[in-house]
């Protein structure tokens, strides 16, 4: 979540008048994340999230996201579907952006999850994968394996402004991971593709919400677990791996969806790919985020450090030490 587009109180009041949600009391921009503009909105009736879709979220993809959330909600998963206005429309326009008013889910996002919370997150991810078994829609992964090399090329030698030698280190790692990627050999389904701790709401050790589905797509199912494992199992800097968290995620997931031998064999490559995907997207955002945006930039090197854990042979020694 973030704020790129500013919405006045007057414009927001007019927007809310389309809904049966009461009158505006307050609205506060949410700075976390990097993808969309988000506001926490309180009305005389309740609390909501207003999302304006920016940057990598294409308006044409919104029906997929909304359908997926409706499908998961109907299966009993704790997800926040968009609210329809009085005319039955969920996708609106506000300040020149596609926008949705979304149900607020209670709970807190964690900075330092416990193994018990990681176990619950692993279970929730597996339950989501079970629930999409009969979801008919599909969407290509716009941040999938075939996009990493083009994104790397767009960043170019500017990568070395983030860290000396970063360009060549990522170039070499990409060559190895792309050559080993398990294409068309593992099960695929609708995946979240961004299940960081801040996209899981917890109440104690119970998952109360899975949020921010705006990278959701059709891709290798266990790639979703690899993304989650790389996001949850390290400290914020990516320097320290917490085996108890990583093991708990696996245990929770396999309670509902045991991995096949082929999926286990492919997991290190999938995890290395997750590290490259987020190192590259963070690097691009680091180099291109507007100076006046209310947004928290994410450190690309935190994922280079994770890559050194999953695939230490892919990085030269001086980059491991630098990262």
Image (cartoon, rainbow, N blue to C red):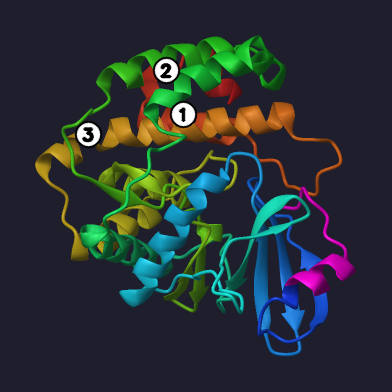
Residue 11 falls inside the magenta stretch: yes
What's the magenta region?
A: 1-15
Q: Secondary structure at mark 2?
A: helix
At x 55%, y 28%, the residue is 280
Q: Earlier in the sequence, mark 1 or mark 3?
A: 3
Residue 204: in sight, yes or no? yes
At x 76%, y 89%, the residue is 44
The correct choice, above or below, for 63 with respect to 72 in the image is above
The residue pinned by badge 1 equals 276
Q: CA distance from mark 1 to mark 3?
A: 16 Å
The correct choice, above or below, for 144 with respect to 205 in the image is above
Residue 1: in sight, yes or no? no
Q: Which mark is residue 266?
A: 3
Residue 285 shown left or right of residue 293 in the figure: left
At x 63%, y 46%, the residue is 35
Q: Secondary structure at mark 1?
A: helix
Q: Position of residue 288 (x, y in %)?
A: 73, 29
Q: Position of residue 210 (x, y in %)?
A: 46, 65
Whether label 2 touches label 3, CB < 8 Å: no
């Amino acid at each position: 979540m973030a704020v790129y587009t500013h919405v006045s109180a007057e414009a927001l009041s007019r927007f809310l008048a389309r809904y049966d949600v009461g009158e505006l009391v307050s609205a506060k921009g949410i700075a976390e994340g990097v993808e969309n503009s988000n506001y926490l909105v309180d009305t005389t009736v309740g609390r909501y999230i207003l999302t304006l879709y920016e940057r990598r979220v294409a308006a044409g993809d919104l029906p997929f996201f909304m359908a997926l959330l409706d499908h998961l909600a109907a299966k009993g998963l704790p997800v926040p579907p968009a609210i329809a206005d009085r005319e039955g429309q969920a996708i609106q326009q506000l300040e020149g952006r596609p926008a949705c008013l979304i149900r607020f889910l209670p709970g807190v996002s964690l900075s330092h999850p416990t193994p018990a919370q990681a176990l619950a997150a692993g279970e929730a991810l597996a339950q989501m994968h079970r629930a999409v078994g009969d979801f008919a829609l599909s969407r290509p992964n716009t941040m999938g394996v075939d996009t990493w090399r083009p994104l790397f090329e767009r960043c170019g030698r500017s990568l070395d402004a983030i860290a000396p030698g970063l360009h060549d280190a990522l170039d070499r790692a990409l060559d190895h991971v792309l050559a080993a990627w398990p294409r068309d050999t593992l099960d695929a389904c609708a995946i979240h593709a961004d299940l960081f701790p801040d996209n899981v709401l917890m109440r104690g050790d119970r998952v109360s919400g899975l949020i921010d589905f705006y990278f959701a797509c059709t891709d290798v199912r266990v790639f979703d677990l690899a993304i989650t494992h790389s996001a949850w199992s390290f400290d914020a800097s990516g320097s320290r791996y917490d085996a108890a968290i990583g093991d708990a995620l696996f245990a929770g997931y396999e309670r509902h969806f045991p991995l096949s031998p082929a999926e286990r064999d492919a997991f290190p490559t999938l995890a290395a790919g997750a590290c490259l995907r987020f190192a590259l997207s963070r690097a691009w955002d680091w180099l291109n985020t507007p100076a006046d945006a209310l947004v928290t930039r994410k450190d690309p090197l935190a994922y280079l450090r994770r890559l050194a854990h999953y695939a230490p042979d892919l990085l030269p020694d001086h980059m491991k030490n630098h990262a």
